[in-house]
């Protein structure tokens, strides 16, 4: 339960920071998708969150277009706690298993890194540039 609480606090805080960020292209983010394969520990924590109703689980096409990946949506009932608009969420962010593990064990460090840098360093930007720079 401690890892689940840490993960919820880290992700909710991150979604709030993205909402307030002038750099974010999509501010109404409420979910994460894995850019790699999460291990059993991470899946166990997320499954516990689904069982308790803190997350909803789904899947989407992966970034490479070769299959499906896990998608976890933060429950709308948590939106007021993180001052998010549950009616307006539309996007998701790709994230690595390492970043989720950091959020489970060190949520304050996870949020500090997000606050000090751009969200693209923690969340992977699924949009690629059309032209090489």
Image (tube, rainbow, N blue to C red):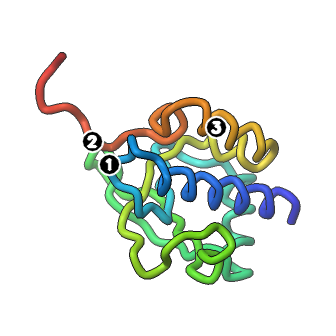
Q: Is 86 displayed left or right of 91 in the figure?
A: right
Q: Residues within 10 Å of mark 1 (few under 14, many from 20)?
A: few
Secondary structure under tag 3 reads helix
Q: Position of residue 85 (x, y in %)?
A: 49, 75
Closest to the observer: 115 or 76?
115
* Residue at the disc numbered 3: 98
* Residue at the disc numbered 1: 25
Name the mark on residue 127: 2
Residue at point 63% right, 77% down? 80
Please tell me which of labels 2 and 1 falls first in the chain: 1
Q: In the image, which is nearer the foreground, mark 3 or mark 1?
A: 1
Q: In the image, which is nearer the foreground, mark 2 or mark 1?
A: 1
Please tell me which of labels 3 and 1 falls first in the chain: 1
Closest to the observer: 122 or 42?
122
Q: How many numbered badges does the structure rendering display?
A: 3
Do callouts 2 and 1 mark residues in contact (Cβ within 8 Å)? yes
Residue at point 49% right, 63% down? 31
Q: Residues within 10 Å of mark 3 (few under 14, many from 20)?
A: some
State whether residue 115 is above or below residue 42.
above
Name the mark on residue 83: none
Q: Position of residue 94 (x, y in %)?
A: 45, 48
State whether residue 75 is above or below residue 38.
below
Q: Position of residue 28 (x, y in %)?
A: 41, 63
Farthest left residue in view: 131
Farthest top residue in view: 133
- Gap between marks 3 and 2 measured at Cα: 21 Å
Closest to the observer: 122 or 116?
116
Residue at point 69% right, 53% down? 10
- Could you tell me which quadrant the C terminus lies in? top left
- Could you tell me which quadrant the N terminus lies in? bottom right
Residue at point 49% right, 34% down? 118
């Amino acid at each position: 339960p401690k890892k689940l609480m840490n993960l919820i606090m880290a992700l909710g805080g991150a979604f709030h920071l993205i909402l307030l960020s002038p750099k974010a292209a999509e501010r109404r983010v409420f979910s994460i998708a894995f850019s790699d394969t999460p291990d059993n520990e991470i899946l166990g924590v997320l499954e516990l969150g689904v069982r308790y109703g803190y997350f909803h689980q789904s899947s989407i096409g992966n970034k490479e277009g070769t299959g499906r990946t896990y998608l976890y949506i933060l429950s709308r009932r948590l939106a007021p706690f993180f001052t998010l608009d549950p009616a307006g969420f539309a996007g998701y962010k790709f994230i690595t298993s390492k970043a989720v593990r950091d959020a489970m064990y060190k949520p304050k460090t996870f949020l500090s890194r997000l606050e000090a840098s751009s969200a693209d360093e923690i969340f992977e930007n699924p949009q690629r540039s059309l032209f090489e720079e």
